[in-house]
Image (cartoon, rainbow, N blue to C red):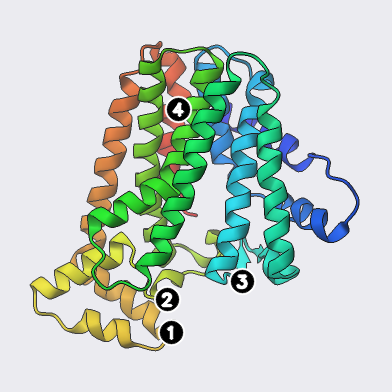
Amino acid sequence: MQQLPVLSAFVEQHATQKHFPETPENLYDPLRYFLSIGGKRMRPILTLMAAQAFDVSKEESIHAGLAIEFFHNFSLIHDDIMDAAPVRRGMQTVHEKWNSNIAILSGDVLLVEAYQQLLAYPDHRLAPLLQRFNQTAIEVCEGQQMDMDFEARADVSEAEYIEMIRLKTSVLLGCALEFGAILANQSDDTRKRIYDFGVELGIAFQIQDDLLDLYADPEKFGKQVGGDILSNKKTLLMLRAKHLAESKNDSRFEELIQMPANESKIAAAKALFIELGAVEEVTSVMNEYYNKAMADLNSLPILEELKAPLHDLADYLLNREH
């Protein structure tokens, strides 16, 4: 993990030092605030790591990484409005600190800033960067719409859920990694392999996030633990628990769904999902996607020592506590 602290600090410096105009204050202050409250900066780090694996410097790839990071933060600001989320990264969300209208408009500016970063590559690489970025942006919106549609459906399947998180979360990791390959003028085959690595890793990452939502240490998680349970969100963990309960004629899952949204519901879910075997089975699914991701990474036609930082980061992500 020798590269991670260096790249993390490099990304943090550039993300938080982005200069926004002083006025209108209610447009730009929320962006300064949101970018200053941190986050793992995982996506731009992936771009820089992929670029370095193909012998492109972090100084050259930082603009592509910031495009990914600004888009990601734009989507978070808007997602928090849709989810009525009070906390992000342990701090007030933008719509709570200001209001929803300000959050929408500030988020829009951040999306435009993402495109501005890609203009740092005015050569033959700009077109493939924009093509991948635009496709990814559309897919992220499709995934968010699927997620919202699921709220009104009782028949969501596990396959549909996996497709939703592929779109909402995973394709952006794939995009981040493919950006590094595009900057290095790699072949279509190599670009696809590193993109697939990101997508599979992203699915594993999101499944782990669903597990952490219920079982993480609240002080480390940075947002409300058990939020998915309180809202009866149809995560893979919830869907698998429902299936296992039905197969055993166990009524406790349906009773859990009907419980008031409080700490008792969270505690009941923690115990029930372990007892049903849902946690164990969902962890197994997560590991399957992680192993697929590692196979994609191992297939890349580059030296093993150049893949090592990506291996290390993938291991770090799947062993995180928040």
**Dot placed on the residue nearer the N-terminal end, 1 or 3:** 3
* C-alpha span from label 2 to label 4: 35 Å
**Dot placed on the residue nearer the N-terminal end, 1 or 4:** 1
Residue 252, relative to residue 213: is it above or below? below
In the picture as drawn, the residue positioned furthest to the left comes out as: 248
* C-alpha span from label 4 to label 3: 33 Å
Residue 23, relative to residue 303: is it above or below? below
In the picture as drawn, the residue positioned furthest to the right comes out as: 22
Horizontal side of 302 relative to 37 (left or right) equals left
Give the SS element for disc 1: loop
Q: Are marks 2 and 1 in contact (CB under 8 Å)?
A: yes
Tag in front: 1 or 4: 1
**Dot placed on the residue nearer the N-terminal end, 4 or 3:** 3
* C-alpha span from label 3 to label 2: 14 Å
Q: Name the residue under label 2.
A: 231
When asked about the image quadrant of residue 90, the answer is bottom right
When asked about the image quadrant of residue 316, the answer is top left
Residue 233 lies, in percent from the top left, at 38, 70
Q: Mark 3 points at which residue?
A: 86
Horizontal side of 199 relative to 279 (left or right) equals right
Residue occupying image coordinates x 25% and y 66%? 239
Give the SS element for disc 4: helix
> Amino acid type of disc 2?
Ser
> Amino acid type of disc 1?
Ala
Q: Name the residue under label 1.
A: 261
> Amino acid type of disc 4?
Leu
Q: Is residue 1 visible?
A: no
Residue in front for this viewpoint, 108 or 20: 108
* C-alpha span from label 2 to label 1: 7 Å
Horizontal side of 176 relative to 20 (left or right) equals left
